[in-house]
Amino acid sequence: DGGITQSPKYLFRKEGQNVTLSCEQNLNHDAMYWYRQDPGQGLRLIYYSQIVNDFQKGDIAEGYSVSREKKESFPLTVTSAQKNPTAFYLCASRGASGNTIYFGEGSWLTVV
Amino acid sequence: RKEVEQDPGPFNVPEGATVAFNCTYSNSASQSFFWYRQDCRKEPKLLMSVYSSGNEDGRFTAQLNRASQYISLLIRDSKLSDSATYLCVGQGVSGGYNKLIFGAGTRLAVHP
C-alpha cells in the first residue's frame, strides 16, 4: 500500500544526544514536510523540501537539520542544540497536482 | 494574533446533536482551506476541503466566508466516533511554496 512511514514511533533521548527520525514515502510525492506538535498547540513547520537535494527552513528550524538525498526519504535530525525537543513529530508529503498533504503516523520523542 | 484561530473547546455534546465549529484567519492571501480530524495521539487526516460555495459530505458541511475571513464546520447527528480534535487549516503561497497554517484545533467529545 502507498503511504508515509515514520520510525521509530517512540524514542527516548538523553540530553546532549542527537537523534534522527526517519520518514519514507512511496507516493512519488515531490514535496515533503516536517512538523512539530506540542500539547494544545497547532502544528508548526520545522523544514520542508519541494524537490530532491533542496530543502528550506520552516518557522522553527533552530536545533534541527534535514537532508533530501532521495525523493522517497526526508530524515530529520534533532540536535543537542534543540533546547526543548520533547514533542510529537509529524512527517508529511504532497504531490505536484494536489493541495492535500498526507501525514505519517508520527514519532513521539521524549528527552529523559 | 495567530494566523488561524479556533475555539479550543472542548465541546461536549450528546449523540445526535448538531455542533458547529468556527475558525478565523488573518491572512487574506490564503487561498485554500481544509478541515482535518486528529484522534488522540494520532496523525491528522483530511476530513474535507472548504469551498466558497459551501460543500457537504454526508453529515458534515463546510463553509468559507472570505469577506469575514472565517471558516465553519457543521456536524449533524453526532456519533460517538466523531469524538476527536478538528483542525482548521489555511493554505497560501509564501516564499515560493505552498504554506499550510494549522489552527490549534477544537476538541469534540460526543457522549451517549
Image: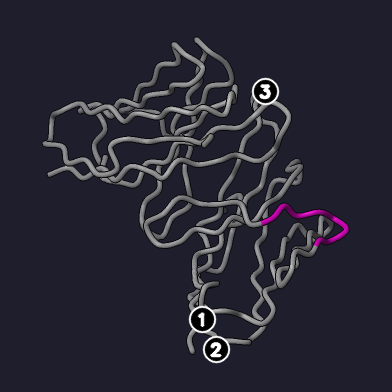
**Outermost residue to the right:** B53
Label 1 amino acid? Answer: Val
State the extent of the magenta-drawn residues as a range. B48-55
Which residue is identified by label 1? B110
Which residue is identified by label 3? B96
* Left or right: B34, with A104 as reference point: right
Which residue is identified by label 2? B14
* Left or right: A59, with B93 as reference point: left
How many numbered discs?
3
- Binning the other alpha carbons within 10 Å of mark 1 as few (below 14), some (14 to 19) or many (20 upward) gives some
Label 3 amino acid? Answer: Gly
* Residue at image coords 17%, 41%: A12
Residue A31 percent across, percent down from the top left: 58, 25
* Residue at image coords 40%, 62%: B40
CB-based contact (under 8 Å), mark 3 and mark 2: no
CB-based contact (under 8 Å), mark 1 and mark 3: no
Name the foreground residue: B71 vs B75.
B75
